[in-house]
Image (cartoon, rainbow, N blue to C red):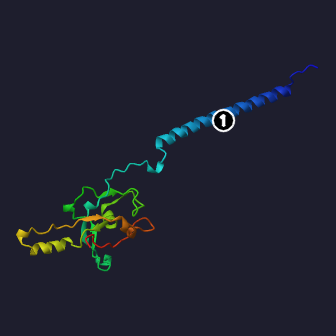
């Protein structure tokens, strides 16, 4: 018996080829799109949250000095805190600094230096500039006197927990001077 291709067989064959072509075209387009996405990911890096550039200098307690606390900030016998020196006696040339991966100030990458001094530094002693000026007035010129400012030091690791807060913004640790 002789088989002849009828009109129905040719149309089914064309539909099948058209469907095959459509699937192949979609795969090719998908491969191009996947390659483009792969290229975009490689250009951004694998850690998109860490690919920013922070221009600010790192924070340092050497930029801070001991100051008196405001009456509302006094906690028991703790009357000193760390802060910025007066504008004409600045120790560092920047007013904002970076704190990346900081345990106390987790919510920020760049902060005001004043804030860093308050939360992350500890007074070296309780002597404030006004106290040292009074001592200088009593001292004789031959004894040398005192430097007006008392430096601050980084909070020791074992005391950092006192400055941590659940909101990631830090809290007043009210630390005693480091020399006590």
Quadrant where the C terminus sits is: bottom left
Q: Which of 162 and 82 is in front in this view?
A: 162
The percent coordinates of residue 105 (x first, y second) are: 39, 62
Picture residue at 24% right of the left edge, 57% below the top: 92
Q: Please count the marks in the image.
A: 1
Quadrant of the rendered image containing residue 61: bottom left
Picture residue at 21% right of the left edge, 62% below the top: 87
Quadrant of the rendered image containing residue 130: bottom left
The percent coordinates of residue 113 (x first, y second) are: 30, 61
Say if 43 sits above or below 128 in the image: above
Say if 51 sits above or below 152 in the image: above
Q: Please identify the residue farthest to the right as the structure is shown.
A: 1
Q: On the picture, is 20 further left or further right than 165?
A: right
Q: On the picture, is 141 further left or further right than 19?
A: left
Q: Nearer the viewer, residue 51 or 5?
A: 51
Picture residue at 51% right of the left edge, 38% below the top: 39
Quadrant of the rendered image containing residue 34: top right
Say if 126 sits above or below 97 in the image: below
The percent coordinates of residue 128 (x first, y second) are: 21, 72
Say if 35 sits above or below 126 in the image: above
Label 1 element class? helix
Q: Please identify the residue farthest to the top as the structure is shown.
A: 2
The percent coordinates of residue 102 (x first, y second) are: 39, 59
Residue matched to label 1: 26
Crowding at dot 1, Cα within 10 Å, few <14 / some 14-19 / many 20+, comes out as few
Q: On the picture, is 147 further left or further right than 153?
A: left
Quadrant where the N terminus sits is: top right
């Amino acid at each position: 018996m002789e088989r002849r291709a009828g009109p129905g067989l040719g149309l089914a064959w064309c539909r099948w080829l058209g469907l095959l072509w459509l699937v192949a075209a979609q795969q090719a387009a998908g491969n191009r799109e996947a390659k483009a996405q792969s290229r975009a990911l490689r250009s951004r890096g694998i850690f998109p949250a860490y690919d920013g550039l922070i221009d600010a200098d790192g924070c340092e307690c050497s930029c801070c000095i001991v100051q008196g606390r405001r009456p509302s900030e006094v906690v028991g016998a703790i009357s000193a805190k760390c802060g910025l020196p007066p504008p004409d006696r600045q120790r560092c040339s920047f007013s904002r600094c970076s704190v990346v991966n900081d345990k106390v100030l987790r919510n920020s990458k760049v902060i005001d230096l004043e804030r860093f001094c308050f939360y992350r530094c500890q007074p070296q002693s309780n002597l404030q500039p006004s106290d040292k000026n009074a001592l200088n007035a009593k001292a004789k010129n031959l004894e040398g006197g005192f430097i007006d400012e008392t430096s601050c030091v980084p909070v020791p690791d074992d005391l950092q927990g006192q400055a941590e807060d659940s909101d990631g913004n830090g809290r007043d640790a009210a630390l005693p001077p480091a020399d006590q």
